[in-house]
Image: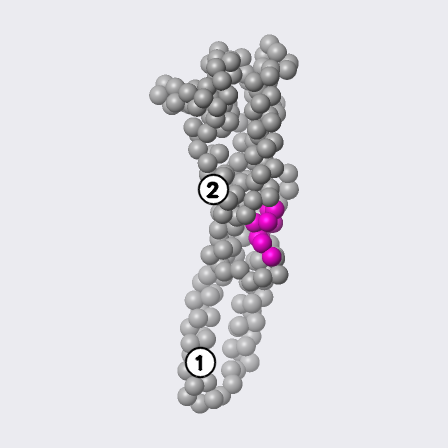
Amino acid sequence: MDSQLTDADALQRCRTSLHALRRFSDDVCELMRGLARVLRDTGRPPSLTTLDQLAQYRSEYEQLRAEVPHLGNMSGNSSEDRSLEEIETELESLALVRATFERLELVPLIRHIDQIDFAPWGNCLADGMRVREQLLVMSAADAKDAAEQFLSKPAPLNAAITMITDSAALSDERWSLLLDAVTEGYGRELSTAIARGKLILMSNASA
């Protein structure tokens, strides 16, 4: 997994830079409106200070664009300017993809206590790899939607992970809902194994 995609600090730094750039953009808007009035009324060129502020905004924008981690074709053509809204969507997508990857990392750490090769869990392993590969090549909007769908606990694979790793925190109603999702997605053999406590997260891992 790309370390940038899993680095929460890097994503937070990008969010902080984005918020600062949004505030700066408000100042630049006022500056440019004033500049337009001066050009219209007097024809005087912008001052060096004004040009420096515009150059600074451009520099900070380009730095932020360069720091946003790339995921498949999420960023499209990196040579093109993107709006701050588009960059914000990319950061939201990256955060959701990161959360999804964290869940998927648990799948290979889950074992059947009696069967080394438990075929129904093999289907979950395959699905986990498929979801990860798909997220790596999706656009920002599609990755965001796919990650949100996966992280919705009734989604069969995440439901199975949740039942195995977080069972003690689940209410009876929630447990039943997740069990139904696993049964529907993977069949009764897997849901029965989970209900009987046959699938466990290995002791050197944490949920």
- Hey, which quadrant is residue 79 in on the image? bottom right
Viewer-proximal residue among 35 and 77: 77
Percent of width and height locating residue 53: 53, 73
Q: Which residues are magenta?
A: 68-77
Q: Residue sitting at 60 percent across and 42 percent down?
A: 136
Q: Tell me the residue that label 1 is attached to.
A: 36
Q: Which residue is mark 2?
A: 145
Against 33, residue 200 (above or below) is above
Return the residue nearer the eye: 20 or 37.
Answer: 37
| SS assignment at label 2 | helix
Q: Residue 44, how many percent across, how many down? A: 49, 88
Q: Is residue 192 visible?
A: yes
Judging from the image, what secondary structure is the residue with disc 1 in? Answer: helix
> Left or right of 154: which side holds 189?
right
First-in-chain label (1 vs 2)? 1
Q: Quadrant of residue 170?
A: top left
Q: Position of residue 176 (x, y in %)?
A: 39, 19
Q: Residue at x 36, y 18 (%)?
A: 172
Q: Is residue 72 magenta?
A: yes
Residue drawn at (56%, 67%) of the image: 58
Where is residue 78? Give x, y as percent: 61, 57
Please check the rendered image and state whether residue 24 is part of the magenta-colored stretch, yes or no.
Answer: no
Crowd band around label 1 with a 10 angstrom C-alpha radius: few (<14), some (14–19), many (20+): some
* Three-letter amino acid code of the residue under disc 2: Asp
Is 164 displayed left or right of 171 in the figure?
right
